[in-house]
Structure formats: structure tokens, C-alpha cells
Amino acid sequence: MGLTMRERQAVTKEVSLRYQKATKKQKGIMLNEFIELTGYTRCYASYVLRNHGRQIRVSRAIVIEGDIRKRRKRKRQKYYDEKVFEVLKKIWLIMDCICGKRLAPALKEVVLKLQKHKEIAIDKGTRQKLFKISPATIDRML
């Protein structure tokens, strides 16, 4: 008859503290004993012992211990803002909704022509961003 879940958790708590500080040779011995005691597979047992008690920050206020499935998403600032999107959408409609791979190479010429004929009015920073945008980013934005 095996251990109950509470007993397994208690054993895991005790063994994991020693396991995380042990050398590689000691970890192998401890892992074999832990497998026999709990009935876990070797892969899962090493996973449980490595990650037990690890703190994961979900948000500023919430910290979870031992649950590595919930990770804080990295929030990156948007490089291409709403101005770029609006101008890009307008150019895309003028160009008859072509794909990003075809629009990206022609974008520099089209922007200059449209500015010359006063079809669009954009500032220097937005224009530079439009010149640097990749075809994949165009497809994602549109």
C-alpha cells in the first residue's frame, strides 16, 4: 500500500530541501530512494524535487510557491504605436490590400509619393518607423 497524498507532500518537502543543495552523485542516490518511497516515475520525481518551494511572481502582489506553470508574462512596450497603425492601414487600403511581403519593399516609395501629393500627413518619427517595419509585422498589424 502506498503513501497518502499528505504523506507524499511531507516527504517531498523534506527531501527537496536536501536535494536542491546536494551534489550530482548524492542527487542520484536520493532520487532512487524517493522513487521507491513515493512511487513516482524518475522524471516526475526529479521535476518535483527541483521545483518544490520555488516562488513564481504572477503579478506584483501575487506570489505562488511551487507552481511553475503560471508565469508572469513579459510586457514589452509597443514599438509601432497607433499612429503607425493608422497610416499603415490607410496605405494598405490605397494599395488595394496587398500582403505584407509585397507592401514592405514598396512602402518607402509609396509613403514619399503620398506625402508629396498630400494624401497622408505624418511626422518624421512615424515615417522612420514605417521605413523600418518588416513584412511579418505588417501582416500581424493588419
Image: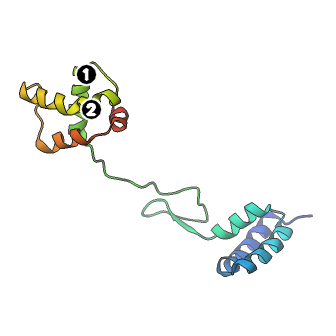
The quadrant holding residue 138 is: top left
Q: Nearer the viewer, mark 1 or mark 2?
A: 2
Seen in the picture, residue 47 relative to 19 is either above or below; the reply is above
Q: Is residue 117 left or right of residue 141?
A: left
Give the side of residue 24 with respect to residue 55, left or right: right
Of the residues shown, which amino acid type is indicated by label 2? Pro
- In the image, residue 138 sits, relative to residue 48, either above or below, namely above
* Residue located 34% across and 26% down the image: 99
Q: Given the image, on which type of amino acid does mark 1 rest?
A: Leu
Q: Nearer the viewer, residue 17 or 117?
A: 117
- Give the residue drawn at x 12%, y 27%: 113
Q: Is residue 120 visible?
A: no
Q: Nearer the viewer, residue 106 or 71?
A: 106
Q: Disc 1 and disc 2: Cα gap in Å? A: 16 Å
Q: Which residue, as the protein is rendered here, is positioned at the far right?
A: 1
Q: Is residue 31 visible?
A: yes
Residue 15 spot, x, y in % from top left: 73, 76
Q: Number of marks in the image?
A: 2
Q: Nearer the viewer, residue 106 or 19?
A: 106
- Which residue is label 2 attached to? 105
- The dot on residue 93 is 1
Say if 106 sits above or below 27 in the image.
above
Residue at image location 28% in from the left, 33% down from the top: 104
Q: Quadrant of the C terminus?
A: top left
SS label for mark 2: helix
Q: Judge from the rendering whether residue 142 lies leftward or rightward of residue 56; answer left or right.
A: left
| x, y percent for residue 44 | 73, 61
Q: In which quarter of the view is residue 119 placed? A: top left
